[in-house]
Image (cartoon, grey):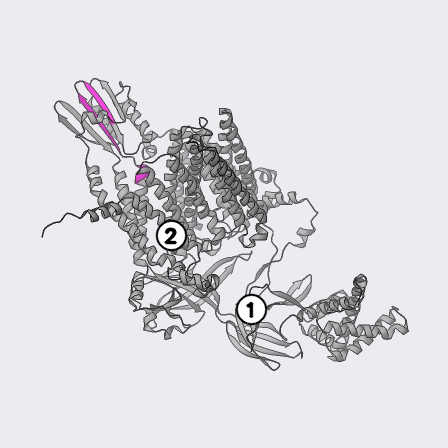
């Protein structure tokens, strides 16, 4: 890693990119520096250096980041300082306003998911490469949309403007962006394009949530920051957390891929049939609950959808267990899947640790204590303990295979509860992400 | 003294406690235990738990500490075991690791090298100096040993990885120690010994006895206090503990000068800030003055002061007390968040005032323009809404409100929510009052129409006249006269019409529109009911117009012309009169003024362990980073008898390492076709 950042092996393009990043940072400072306090100036400097490091570490970023920035700058130019132009100017209305970009992101992710499955099942390299292209397009749209949304928030009101990581809608876009970027990195590094079929599933689920949240709840509207969120800690705590969540989501889907790639000992027909029936029963119970939730459990609210989702996931897990090895030969080597899984979890674990520490530092400033055993904090600890155990078992005990794959899948369920379920079912200080 | 070998039991215990298996099990148990405390809301008042679970389960849950899991003995016990396990694990592995970090393994035998996973061999010797230069560039350090004509170069890099292990695990111990310093272990021990007990009575802080007080020298605490603007200040904070609280003395006095609250145009709060002064406890001298905001605490003598809540600190209120029966009006002085006796008629009541809320932003639903817009289909509308990041909300500040209860001598209470400012609805002005009988119910709102002088007097006069049986004949006479003049019926029917009008007034006076409805249901066949109801309503409205004329004349007030606006006033008055039958009180307290005194909830903490915790955190991140992203690699070059052997090993076998081996092989032994085994 340190070798990857040393100056000796840099190409001219690296220096062009670094210059570009420095110019952008310098421009931002010259224009807005006097609005920033020291912390924010520090963050700007840190962000600029991080961008350069990121571009040097992963060469594709030297193209991706400037392209996204140019798209965002186009949108900002078209706005001419008037938010209403988003509804009238053609390019903004259909392409470049943040909401249009989010919609394009959704479309690209759905298409990419389809392409990956087509490519996986038909062994079509063409379809897989189209899938990768679409994923790149979607991530570009996602990053640009976040940048444009940032600008739009200032058009609503100078006191309203803030970085778009403040509510559930905004962080879901962030989740899609980060998970997809991680996939793009690993698929290139490990020549494992077809894993996209699985990783894009979790992204597609997030996209489905974004669409529901937009059309049913109008959650895409930019809200001003309540006092508790007016802190520069938010700018780093939330993204760090979502690198963790994205990595855990990715590793869980690789776990599923591993399970479907490696055959297991077949159980006898009777047990299999019973398990199929159980899976159908669980799924059915979940669906019935969803349809009758308003009548039976009105206090659950949108929690019913969460429980149904969990039931469907459990049913899907049972099916995966019954169909072990279904896709053997179609996916990359199981060892490769296992290694990406490990890499993702170790990245996720590192960033999740950092995010939790940043959260504690923020809590010490906002709530009067770095640790209050608030449900969100406690669940963050549970997630952390879970992956700490996973890593110990892989690294120290040297385990590989089905147990770790299942554990990664279960880890995602725990993480999802910590991310969404806590806000839905448990009250506490972290009430910003309420549905 | 003789040293004894540990007994097999102690040895086994040590093995168990320092084993990974045990640590992982503890991690899992800790995670599951932590879940319990998130499912059950912690540190609520005990009465809530009693109510929720009933006596039986409360009796089981309470002793095992389910209401404060994270401070329960068993939970702290698990944490302690985890700490012990970690410490033993470090103790057990550290010496070996340090040896490993220092050593180059230059005594490795040729046989053992050949057995490694990554080996390559080639004929002929290599230039050792060039090899060393190559290894130096790649970041290796090495040692060369010559023995029996063989040269062995043993190199290594990435020793920090092992240190990472030490950092990460030591960090957890450090964090736990810091957390323990800030926890309430000392207090828990005092509680166990019986020298301290939590106070459960509601008494003034100064009256709390010594056994429930904690001195200002207490090393770590986290307590709350509520201060009123301009009040005397506080020299203590309160710490919740189980079913009661402790009084924590402060080394200074903290006083609230003013509390600020700012809102965005959308009504969401934008800023909570308290201007406070910190005074010396003995001399009263100012130590520090400043503003505490959310996310911006003020730190005084190692104690951090945080903004944690706000409310009404007891504001002076003025009401116009309007007697709904007699029509008399008087002024009532009150204070929010207090109670005072009140006599209504001959009955004694208690007026219990709640919070004064100066700012009430309400979402008034869709604007007229939005609903009357050309009806596009829903899909189009949804798309339109999804495209814009700025929602159109019809928000309005409806002004100050005061909530209060009127409790009779039997203890029965009705709760009211009255607004000070007139509420404008389609051009007409109203006073709004909400009423409910149980806290669980929503408020039922009554809108009292205001007259041309923006006062409720005309409505109250009209209501009084309408409900007064002595006025009914006069009203009925006027109404029938008016109808006769309009040619609605012949002279012979006039007496009947008067009688019907009186009946309608009588029914209305017994309970408003529902009473008329009941009357119709009892007297009129179902088929004819809608038509008769329509007629009755018209007559009632006509009678109300006449009642208004009478009421105004009797009071010596001008009679308003019956234009559309005043006709609406009459209809609104009928609706309000009908609604007031369910008002549960014969007086209406109209808020007319207030002097606001806000209160601010502050949290004061002393947490000496925080720095240790953050030091541990930095160590943890550093450790995890080293463990995952530094690969410890060892490399050997064995030159003997005209053959050169390259072997490499790493404690973590990944494809990255395979690539690294390939790189080194190509650089050091270009002629060999080594294969990673």
Q: Note whether residue B278 is visible.
A: no
Q: For the residues marked 1 and 2, what is the alpha-carbon distance in whole angstroms?
A: 42 Å
Q: What span is colored magenta in the figure?
A: B626-647
Marks 1 and 2 close (CB-CB < 8 Å): no
Number of marks in the image?
2
- Quarter of the image for residue A391 reads top left
Residue at x-position 22% and y-position 22%: B645
Q: Judge by depth and name the residue closer to the eye, B211 or A307.
A: A307
- Identify the mark at residue B403; answer none if there is no mark: 1
- Check the picture and name the quadrant holding the N terminus of chain A: top left
Q: Position of residue B337 (x, y in %)?
A: 50, 71
Report which residue position mark 2 lands on. B33
Give the camera-side residue of A227 and A288.
Answer: A288
In which quadrant of the rendered view does residue B229 lie?
bottom left
Residue B218 sits above or below residue A101 on the image: below
Tell me if residue B485 can be seen. Answer: yes
On screen, residue B274 above or below A187: below
């Amino acid at each position: 890693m340190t070798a990857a950042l040393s100056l000796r092996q840099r190409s001219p393009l690296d220096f062009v990119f670094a210059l570009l990043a420095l110019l952008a940072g310098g421009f931002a400072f010259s224009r807005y520096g006097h609005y920033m306090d020291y912390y924010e100036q520090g963050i700007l400097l840190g962000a600029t250096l991080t961008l350069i490091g990121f571009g040097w570490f992963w060469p594709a970023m030297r193209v991706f980041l400037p392209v996204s920035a140019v798209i965002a700058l186009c949108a900002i130019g078209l706005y001419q300082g008037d938010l209403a132009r988003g509804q009238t100017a053609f390019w903004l209305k259909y392409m470049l306003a943040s909401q249009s970009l989010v919609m394009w992101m959704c479309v690209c992710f759905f298409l990419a998911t389809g392409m990956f499955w087509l490519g996986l099942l038909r062994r079509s390299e063409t379809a897989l490469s189209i899938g990768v292209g679409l994923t790149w397009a979607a991530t570009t749209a996602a990053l640009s949309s976040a940048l444009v949304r940032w600008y739009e928030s200032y058009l609503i009101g100078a006191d309203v403007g803030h970085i778009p990581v403040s509510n559930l809608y905004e962080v879901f876009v962030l989740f899609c962006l980060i998970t997809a970027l991680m996939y793009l990195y690993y698929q290139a590094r490990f020549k494992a394009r077809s894993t996209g079929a699985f990783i894009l599933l979790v992204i597609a689920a997030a996209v489905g949530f974004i669409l529901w949240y937009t059309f049913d709840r109008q959650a895409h509207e930019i809200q001003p920051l309540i006092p508790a969120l007016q802190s520069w800690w938010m700018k780093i705590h939330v993204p760090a957390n979502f690198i963790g969540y994205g990595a855990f989501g990715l590793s869980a889907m690789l776990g599923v891929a591993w399970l479907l790639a490696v055959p297991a000992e077949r159980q006898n027909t009777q047990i299999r049939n019973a398990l199929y029936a159980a899976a159908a029963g669980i799924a059915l119970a979940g669906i019935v609950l969803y349809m009758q939730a308003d009548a039976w459990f009105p206090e659950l609210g949108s929690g019913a959808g969460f429980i149904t989702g969990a039931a469907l996931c459990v049913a899907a897990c049972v099916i995966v267990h019954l169909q072990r090895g279904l896709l053997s030969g179609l996916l990359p080597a199981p060892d490769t899947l296992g290694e990406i899984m490990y890499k993702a979890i170790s990245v996720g674990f590192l960033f999740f640790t950092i995010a939790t520490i940043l959260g504690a530092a923020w809590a010490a400033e906002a709530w009067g204590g770095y640790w209050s055993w608030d449900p969100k904090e406690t669940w963050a600890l549970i997630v952390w303990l879970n992956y700490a155990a996973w890593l110990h078992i892989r690294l120290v005990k040297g385990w590989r295979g089905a147990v770790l794959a299942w554990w990664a899948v279960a880890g995602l369920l725990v993480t999802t509860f910590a991310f969404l379920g806590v806000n839905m079912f448990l009250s506490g200080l972290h009430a910003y992400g309420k549905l | 003294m003789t040293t004894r070998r540990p007994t097999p039991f102690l040895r086994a215990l040590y093995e168990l406690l320092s084993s990974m298996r045990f640590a992982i099990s503890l991690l899992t148990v800790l995670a599951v235990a932590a879940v319990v405390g998130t499912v059950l809301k912690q540190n609520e008042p005990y009465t809530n738990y009693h109510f929720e679970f009933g006596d039986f389960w409360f009796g089981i849950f309470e002793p095992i500490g389910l209401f404060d899991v994270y401070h329960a003995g068993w939970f702290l016990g698990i944490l302690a075991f985890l700490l012990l396990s970690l410490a033993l694990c470090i103790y057990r592995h550290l010496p070996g690791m340090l040896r490993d970090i220092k050593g180059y393994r230059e005594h490795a035998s040729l046989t053992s090298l050949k057995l490694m996973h990554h080996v390559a061999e080639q004929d002929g010797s290599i230039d050792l100096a060039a090899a060393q230069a190559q290894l130096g560039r790649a970041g290796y350090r090495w040692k060369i040993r010559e023995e029996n004509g063989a040269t062995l170069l043993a190199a290594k890099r990435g020793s920090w990885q092992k240190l990472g292990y030490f950092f990460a695990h030591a960090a957890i111990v450090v964090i736990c120690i810091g957390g323990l310093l800030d926890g309430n272990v000392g207090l828990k021990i005092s509680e166990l010994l019986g020298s301290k007990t939590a106070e459960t009575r509601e008494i003034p802080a100064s009256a709390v006895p010594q056994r429930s007080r904690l001195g200002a020298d207490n090393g770590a605490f986290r307590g709350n206090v509520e201060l009123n603007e301009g009040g005397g200040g506080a020299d203590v904070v309160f710490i919740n503990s189980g079913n009661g609280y402790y009084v924590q003395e402060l080394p200074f006095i903290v006083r609230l000068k003013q509390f600020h609250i700012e809102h965005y145009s959308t009504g969401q709060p934008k800023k909570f800030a308290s201007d406070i002064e910190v005074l010396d406890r003995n001399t009263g001298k100012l130590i520090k003055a400043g503003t505490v905001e959310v996310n911006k605490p003020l730190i005084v003598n190692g104690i951090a002061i945080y903004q944690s809540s706000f409310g009404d600190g007891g504001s002076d209120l003025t009401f116009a007390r309007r007697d709904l029966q007699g029509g008399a009006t008087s002024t009532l002085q009150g204070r929010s968040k207090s109670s005072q006796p009140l006599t209504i008629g001959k009955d004694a009541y208690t007026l219990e005032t709640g919070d004064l809320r100066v700012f009430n932003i309400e979402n008034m639903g869709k604007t007229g323009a939005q609903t009357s817009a050309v009806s596009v289909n829903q899909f189009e509308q949804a798309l339109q809404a999804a495209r814009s990041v700025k929602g159109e909300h019809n928000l309005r500040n409806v002004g100050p409100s005061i909530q209060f209860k009127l409790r009779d001598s039997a203890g029965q209470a009705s709760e009211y929510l009255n607004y000070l400012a007139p509420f404008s609805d389609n051009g007409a002005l109203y006073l709004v009052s909400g009423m409910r009988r149980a806290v669980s119910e929503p408020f039922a709102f009554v809108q009292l129409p205001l007259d041309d002088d923006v006062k409720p007097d005309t409505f109250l006069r009209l209501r009084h006249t309408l409900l007064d049986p002595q006025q009914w004949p006069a009203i009925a006479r006027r109404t029938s006269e008016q109808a006769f003049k309009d040619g609605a019926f012949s002279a012979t029917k006039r007496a009947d019409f008067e009688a019907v009008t009186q009946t309608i007034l009588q029914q209305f006076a017994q309970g408003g529109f529902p009473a008329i409805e009941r009357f119709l249901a009892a007297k009129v066949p179902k088929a004819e009911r809608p038509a008769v109801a329509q007629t009755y309503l018209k007559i009632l409205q006509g009678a109300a117009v006449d009642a208004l004329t009478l009421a105004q004349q009797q009071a010596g007030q001008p009679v308003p012309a019956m234009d559309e606006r005043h006709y609406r006033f009459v209809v609104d008055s009928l609706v309000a009169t009908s609604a007031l039958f369910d008002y549960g009180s014969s007086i209406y307290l109209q808020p007319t003024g207030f002097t606001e005194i806000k209160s601010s909830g502050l949290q004061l903490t002393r947490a000496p362990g925080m720095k240790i915790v953050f030091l541990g955190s930095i160590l943890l991140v550093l450790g995890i980073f080293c463990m995952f992203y530094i690969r410890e690699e060892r490399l050997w070059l064995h030159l003997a008898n005209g053959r050169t052997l390259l072997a490499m090993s790493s404690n973590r076998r990944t494809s990255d390492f395979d690539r690294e081996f390939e790189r080194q092989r190509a650089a050091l032994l270009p002629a060999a076709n080594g294969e990673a085994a």
